[in-house]
Amino acid sequence: MMETVNLSSHRVWSLPPLILHPFSDSSGPNKLVESSKAHLMIQGLLPSGELSSAELDRRLLDGRYCEIRMLFYVGKDIARWVEQCLESAEREDDLRAMGLQAHSFLNLLIKDTPPGVREKLRKWGVADFQAIFTRAVGLNTIFAVVPEKEQIAAEFTRNYYRYVDQVFTCSSHQIEFPIMKADQFVFELYASGEYSRMLERQWDAD
């Protein structure tokens, strides 16, 4: 990584908003709960009753695949935001001269998160957002489209989070990039429905 960039001016730069679209799957919550229970049963922390080891593993894999799908779509939203940020920076002489890279914005989002974004995630009940965003980006580094369950090896599905964490780390070390300071760059975080309602209010006001 390159050293943190210090802009000569005291200006605070506004970046495009990050809009997260919820992935709706009616069976998703149940699968996640069953997967968590199956994991505890496999670890011997919950009684498995009459469930076979094969059935426990199936429930675990179903839940992990559901996680993969949801995180993949979060990663698509983050990738779209990074592209918008790069386009916005290209239009500003000072920012263009900094040579900002995609990981400059990812680092800002994940490792030096602006306080306003961190607080909103807290209100949403998202505690470990760094892990969520890291894994979402890692999955989008591997897959161009969300894969079908049968296209993923069971070993990867079972432990996908370990693999995608390493993929994110590897990609962030392949190129040097400027580190942006959170006190000089701000952006808003919205859920897609929230952002749509805000636009509607603006249109009504006009």
Image: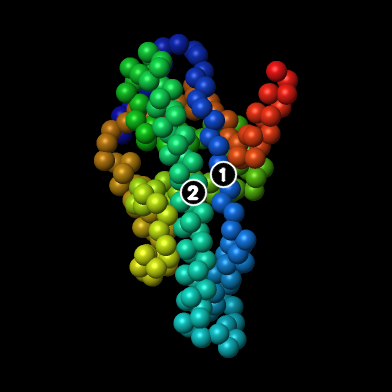
In the image: residue 148, left or right of residue 122 = left
* Position of residue 38 measured from the top left corner of the image (x, y, whole percent): 54, 74
Position of 48 with respect to 6 (left or right) is right
Identity of the residue drawn at 39% across and 48% down: 140
Q: What's the mark number on residue 21?
A: 1
At a point 59% along the width and 82% down the height, the residue shown is 47
Residue drawn at (51%, 78%), measured in percent from left and top?
Answer: 56
Residue type highlighted by circle 1: His
Q: Which comes sooner in the sequence, label 1 or label 2? A: 1
Disc 2 element: helix
Q: Quadrant of residue 40?
A: bottom right
- Could you tell me residue 159's position as x and y percent? 41, 64
Which residue has dot 2 on it?
Answer: 73
At x 62%, y 66%, the residue is: 30
Kindly indicate the quadrant of the structure image that contains residue 41.
bottom right
Q: Are marks 1 and 2 in contact (CB under 8 Å)?
A: yes
Residue 200's label in the rendered image is none
Q: Is residue 146 above or below residue 21?
A: below
Quarter of the figure that contains the N terminus = top left
